[in-house]
Amino acid sequence: MALDLKRFFQACNPSNTLVIGKAEDKQYYIDFSSVRGTKIIEQFKRTIARLSPEVPTCQLFTGHIGCGKSTELLRLKAELEQEDFHVVYFESSQILDMADVDVTDILLAIAAEVTKSLEAIKINPKPGYFQDLFKDLYHILQVPVTPESIEFSVGIAKITSKIQDSPSLRSQLRQYLEPRTLGIIESINKDIIKPAQEKLKDQGKKGLVVIIDNLDRIDNTKKPNEQYQPEYLFIERGEQLKNLHCHVVYTVPLILMYSNALGRLNNRFGQSPKVLPMVAVKQRDNSDFTQGITLLKQMVMSRAFPGVNWEQNQNLITKVFDSVDTLERLCKVSGGHLRNLLTLLYGCLQDEDPPITRDCLETVIKQQCNDLNRAIDNQEWQLLKEIHQSKRRIQGDQEYEDLIKNIWVFEYVDSEGSWFDINPILQEAKEFKL
């Protein structure tokens, strides 16, 4: 069987997110829940599907950036659609400025994306409250929005695009919208969600689900009230975010799981965020975890030869790598971080055509190690060594935030609970070995 090099190269692009609803992407998907130590998507799905549309849910999802959250959320979307839910999924980072986000920004984005999705299936909400807002915003922002001549979703899109790159306009908008937050929520519920639920039911749908991805990428900057942005949005203003009358899933920054504010977050939403751990490639005692390594091998080979079962694919490994050991080395050094694995593989494919040699892989690993190592100071190396030895996270919000946002520390889950270790690529550095 010949390797389609062009398609394999495209399939390994770490910037691409698998959309499980697409047939081509689905054949690349590997279910890692058995080696992550948790079945989060099944939990989300069960919570939504077992309740009636009249009982809205609000669930939180987090994990390291690049560990596969978006792929899993798109899987949730596809599976809920198969069960006749209308699901609206969108990436907030495409709409909002992650350095400066407020609750009204998120609410407007939800209103726009839900309405756009409904308009696509011939359900056209008429939110009169927003139409009145548009008239005032025309004068504030000088946006040519004529409510009578354009669809509601287009009107909001014009406004958000106008303010996205302008902090001054954003400030003006917030000054106007902030006192009207409760009215905006009420209008979303009464003028958009409620009639949508009724019309969706007429179409045989079970209800509306909104999935807001990439809010975990918001910066941990301070707001004017001196609160850090994640705490401000999801704790101080969390009651408003959870007050929509439909099923909602928000991604939240991982740093909230390790902050002193976690208890307040849990109390605000009535539950703790679900964390997507890394795919385990080893166990707490540093011994190999064969099941996790095998599934990562399948992930790579499914991109090389999609539609071929694992038993057959094992015999094709040497068409992609110079040896089985080279593929295993790739999987282990990734630490079970899916984007890391694809980044390393993509780097190899940029350097040479398959079969990828061990020398090529080691060169790419060394380059990645050097890139990560540049930003680590002596004190951070000491913290990383402590984590590697203890398999526990260090105490202190700011210190741990730096370690996780730079992809230096990974979280895993086993039968005993969470444990931590450093990115295996950093174990290649001479500073780690000193």
Image: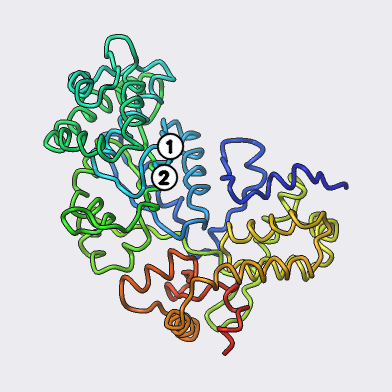
Q: Contact (CB < 8 A) between labels 1 and 2?
A: yes
Q: Left of 260 or right of it: where is 348?
A: right
Q: Left of 288 or right of it: where is 54?
A: left
Along the line of sight, the residue nearer the viewer: 42 or 256: 256
Q: Position of residue 211 (x, y in %)?
A: 39, 41
Residue identified by numbered label 1: 89
Q: Which residue is drawn at 52% across and 64% down?
A: 278
Q: Left of 46 or right of it: where is 292?
A: right
Q: Which residue is drawn at 36% across and 40% down?
A: 96
Q: Quadrant of residue 143?
A: top left
Looking at the image, the residue that sits furthest to the right is 1
Residue identified by numbered label 2: 213
Q: Which residue is drawn at 73% across and 70% down?
A: 362
Helix, strand or loop at label 2? It is: strand
Question: What is the basis of the colouring in this image?
Answer: rainbow
Looking at the image, the residue that sits furthest to the left is 179
- Above or below, 189 relative to 147: below
Along the line of sight, the residue nearer the viewer: 259 or 285: 259
Helix, strand or loop at label 1? It is: strand
Q: In which quarter of the image is the C terminus?
A: bottom right
Q: Is residue 55 visible?
A: no
Which amino acid does the dot numbered 2 rest on?
Answer: Asp
Q: Position of residue 209 (x, y in %)?
A: 37, 36
Q: How many labels does the image show?
A: 2
Which amino acid does the dot numbered 1 rest on?
Answer: Tyr
Q: How crowded is mark 1: few (under 14 residues within 10 Å), some or many (20 or more)?
A: many
Q: Position of residue 212 (x, y in %)?
A: 38, 42
Q: Position of residue 191 (x, y in %)?
A: 23, 23
Give the CA distance from mark 1 to mark 2.
7 Å
* Mark with earlier residue (1, 2): 1
